[in-house]
Image (cartoon, grey):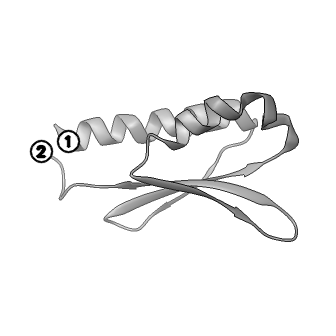
Amino acid sequence: MGYDRRTTEIHAAIAQLTALTGHEPRITDDGGTVRIEADLTTALVPRWLHLLAVLDLGAAYGLRSSEDRQTAWLRFDLPEGPP
C-alpha cells in the first residue's frame, strides 16, 4: 500500500509542478529515491503557497540558486519494492 500511495503522490507532484510552471519538471530516479526539480520564475510568486504545498508532499524539499536559475526540488523516499 505504501508503494502505491507514494507513486500516486509522485505523479500528483509532477502534474502540479507542470501546471504551476508550464514545463515538465526534471525527474531523477535512483532506485531508493525520486527527486523532482522545477525551475522557478517570477510568475510563480503569486502561487507561492501552492508551490510550497506541492513541495511539502515530499520527504524533503528545498530551493537552490545558481547564477542562471533558481530551482525548487523535492525528494520522495521509496519503500522496498511493490507490495
Q: Amino acid at mark 2?
A: Pro
- Residue drawn at 64 percent across, 31 percent down: 49
What label does residue 83 carry, if any? Answer: 2
What label does residue 24 carry, if any? Answer: none
Packing grade of label 2 (10 A; few <14, some 14-19, many >=20) is: few
Secondary structure state at the residue bearing disc 2: loop
- Residue drawn at 65 percent across, 36 percent down: 18
Left or right: 41 in relation to 25: right
Packing grade of label 1 (10 A; few <14, some 14-19, many >=20) is: few
Quarter the C terminus occupies:
top left
Front in this rendered view, residue 4 or 65: 65
Residue pointed to by mark 1: 2
Measured as percent of width and height from the top left, residue 39 is found at 74, 52
Q: Pick whichever of labels 2 and 1 is earlier in the sequence.
A: 1
Rendered view: 43 above or below 80: above
Q: Amino acid at mark 1?
A: Gly
Measured as percent of width and height from the top left, residue 36 is found at 54, 53
Measured as percent of width and height from the top left, residue 10 is found at 43, 42
Rendered view: 30 above or below 47: below
Question: Outermost residue toward the front?
Answer: 49
Rendered view: 50 above or below 68: above
- Residue drawn at 31 percent across, 42 percent down: 6
When asked about the image quadrant of residue 62, the answer is: bottom right
Camera-nearest label, 2 or 1: 1
Left or right: 42 in relation to 81: right
Quarter the N terminus occupies:
top left
Cβ–Cβ under 8 Å for marks 2 and 1 = yes
Measured as percent of width and height from the top left, residue 60 is found at 44, 55
